[in-house]
């Protein structure tokens, strides 16, 4: 009795739950089939050098023969077109201005006056060779020209420059012009006595101190070398401690020079 009841209850259970049992068996069968298919089937090895899961249209890349590099041509920069040179307008002969002739100013004519020691010979000017002479005949130098050097002055008792040459002589001896020239000045100096200056031309002058002018000798008188222009006096107070002498000074271009260097 119990056995029959068990079978009946089993059948009733199967009828009521049979659908779900069948569905569970199907799920189990599908799971087993999937495991066998994916986990037990042999896997194919990919061909060397072939990419897996790539479309057939792509080229195969080989490790031995790689794809050569393809150089893409670069675009050359376009240079801007050179600007066109403007065309120069054509000039007709009438448009060209006439050439101007340079005007040269006439050079001023400089008249050169002959020196005072020049002479006229047949209309031509010839310069004589200058002839120098000592201002006193047969005279010895008593005191020399010192230039910028200081020398002892026996009259003043100190050291100072001596701007001329002293020629020893006696009072009343003749004083001679050392070179041709023109008397430029005659004056009296408190310290150097009676003075007479002669212009010899070429910016050379001579000054005689302690001389009494000869009669007829005045400013503007032309004299020749060796001509008597006066006589020695004894009125040079600045050199009164010395024996009687004639003091001679000479300048060239306004600068004092040694008279002996000119009279040689």
Image: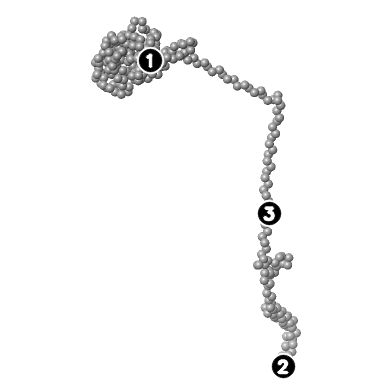
Residue labelled with disc 1: 131
Q: Position of residue 69 (x, y in %)?
A: 66, 60
Q: Gap between marks 1 and 2, in whole Å?
A: 192 Å
Residue 151 vertical position relative to residue 47 in the rendered view, above or below:
above
User: In this rendering, which labeled residue sits more in front, label 3 or label 1?
Assistant: 1
Q: Within 10 angstroms of label 2, few (less than 14), some, or many (20 or more) residues?
A: few
**Picture quarter containing residue 20?**
bottom right
| SS class, disc 2 | helix
Left or right: residue 98 versus residue 193 is right
| Residue 10 shows up from this direction | yes
Numbered circle sitting on residue 3:
2
Q: Quadrant of the N terminus?
A: bottom right
| SS class, disc 3 | loop
Q: Within 10 angstroms of label 3, few (less than 14), some, or many (20 or more) residues?
A: few
User: In this rendering, which labeled residue sits more in front, label 1 or label 2?
Assistant: 1
| Front-lying residue, 108 or 169 | 169
Q: Position of residue 17 (x, y in %)?
A: 73, 83
* Residue at the (63%, 22%) spot, across then down: 100
- Contact between labelled residues 2 and 1, with CB atoms less than 8 Å apart: no
Mark 1 or 2, nearer chain start: 2
* Residue at the (33%, 19%) spot, across then down: 260
């Amino acid at each position: 009795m119990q056995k029959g009841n068990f079978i009946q209850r089993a059948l009733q259970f199967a009828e009521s739950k049979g659908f779900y049992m069948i569905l569970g068996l199907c799920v189990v069968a599908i799971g087993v089939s999937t495991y066998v298919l994916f986990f037990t089937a042999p896997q194919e090895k990919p061909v060397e050098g072939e990419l897996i899961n790539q479309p057939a249209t792509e080229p195969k890349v080989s490790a031995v023969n790689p794809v050569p590099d393809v150089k893409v041509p670069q675009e050359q920069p376009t240079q801007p077109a050179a600007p066109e040179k403007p065309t120069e307008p054509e000039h007709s002969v009438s448009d060209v201005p006439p050439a101007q002739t340079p005007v040269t100013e006439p050079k001023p004519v400089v008249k050169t006056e002959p020196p005072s020691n020049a002479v006229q010979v047949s209309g031509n000017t010839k310069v004589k060779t200058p002839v120098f002479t000592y201002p006193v005949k047969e005279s010895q130098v008593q005191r020399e020209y010192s230039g910028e050097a200081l020398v002892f002055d026996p009259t003043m008792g100190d050291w100072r420059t001596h701007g001329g040459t002293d020629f020893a002589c006696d009072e009343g001896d003749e004083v001679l012009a050392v070179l041709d020239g023109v008397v430029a000045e005659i004056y009296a100096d408190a310290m150097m006595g009676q003075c007479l200056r002669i212009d010899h031309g070429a910016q050379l002058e001579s000054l005689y101190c302690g001389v009494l002018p000869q009669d007829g000798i005045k400013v503007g008188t032309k004299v020749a070398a060796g001509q008597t222009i006066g006589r020695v006096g004894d009125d040079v107070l600045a050199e009164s401690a010395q024996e009687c002498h004639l003091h001679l000074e000479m300048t060239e271009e306004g600068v004092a020079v040694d008279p002996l260097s000119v009279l040689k």
